[in-house]
Image (cartoon, helix red, strand yellow):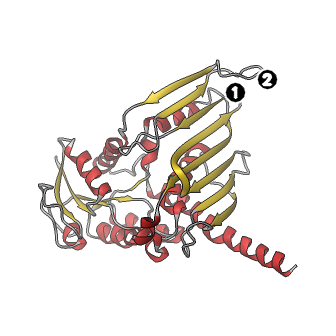
Amino acid sequence: MTLKFGICGFGKMGQIRADAIARRNDCALQIAFDPEPFHDANIPFASSIDAVIERSDVDAVFLCLPNYLNKQTTMAALRAGKHVFCEKPPAFTEKDVDEIRHVEQASGKTLMYGFNHRQHDGVLAMADIVRSRRYGRPLWARGRYGKSVDADYLKGWRAQKELAGGGILIDQGIHMVDLLLMIAGQPFDEISAMVSNMYWQTDGIEDNVFALLRVSETGFSASLHSTMTQWRHLFSLEVFMERGYCVLNGLKTSSGTYGEEVLTIAKNRSKAPAANWDDEERIIFSEDRSWDKELSIFVEAIRNGEPPSAGCSLQAKAVMNVIDRIYVEKRHEAGELFGALQAG
């Protein structure tokens, strides 16, 4: 049976999803919506989001919309009897995700979120190594994810807190939060963070986040830096285990701005203190198959009537728990401390 799709939002992400659908012979794109229709897309365009999610000949929808529309549109589509794939962020808070999950469970439909980085080949290879425990248990991880933006960034919806929900953390760093949770294998129960907007100085839109995360039960710790003042795009995820390490530098993307996706693996420990690079293996991943893999997971979940193996709403809830605690609890504490220092 051919699964019939609709896409709400036909910008860059909507077109990427459309291309993935077109590469499968068991999927078809029926209709799309965008405020500015693409006349050369060779598909019909609806007049509104509702016109897509209410169509009887659409089984599932991709939501590639501005952040503030994600929660309400996801719930509306589930209530309309559609399977839903929504780009990140799932919503603005963990409480929002709880509300979505209630609707999801009542609908009986499949809901998946676009935490796309889990499906990059380098990340999958790293995750396999960590899960195998061939180098022992993971001790700590370090994630850095940054990009450069210019003043044009301030002209769009991403620079408005009420539309974006926050700045670089919820825009891009959310991927790294998800990956660190994947490596940890359980929620972080200790979090401290610093959030700043000292360069772009846009109210409620941070340009840097530094966070420390820990699982107290296992002692696994992670550091996160999410930034839009990198000035040169950067992706780096490091995991150090008892008898070795994995370092993933770069990310294969269509823009090519993050460089080669290279996974470095320590096959054996060098004798300290004269550690060297002789024991390292380097693997270069030259193709980005993440979009096709995500669609395969979504289709399989729909056909099997089970939650997706990656990107499920429970994972989204765990990610938003971390985002909440960085944005709300730690910023508040920092403000109190600053006030105390000023008073002193």
Residue 55 horizontal/vertical position (percent):
17, 67
Query: Is residue 138 shown left or right of residue 93?
Result: right
Q: Residue at x 49, y 74 (%)?
A: 161
Quick one: SS at disc 2? loop
Question: Which image quadrant: the C terminus?
Answer: bottom right
Question: Can you identify the residue that label 2 sits on?
Answer: 272
| Quarter occupied by residue 154 | bottom left
Residue 284 horizontal/vertical position (percent):
46, 28
Query: Is residue 147 shown left or right of residue 11?
Result: right
**Residue placed farthest to the right in the image?**
344
The disc label shown at residue 243, or none: 1
Q: Residue at x 46, y 66 (%)?
A: 151
**Badge 2 density bin: few <14, some 14–19, many ≥20, Cα 10 Å:** few
Q: From where the camera sits, is residue 121 visible? A: yes
Identify residue type, mark 1: Arg
Cα separation, mark 1 vs mark 2, equals 13 Å
Residue 136 horizontal/vertical position (percent):
67, 30
Q: From where the camera sits, is residue 125 visible? A: no
Identify residue type, mark 2: Ala
The disc label shown at residue 51, or none: none
User: In this orientation, which residue lies closer to the viewer: 133 or 232?
Assistant: 232
Q: Earlier in the sequence, mark 1 or mark 2?
A: 1
Q: Nearer the viewer, mark 1 or mark 2?
A: 2
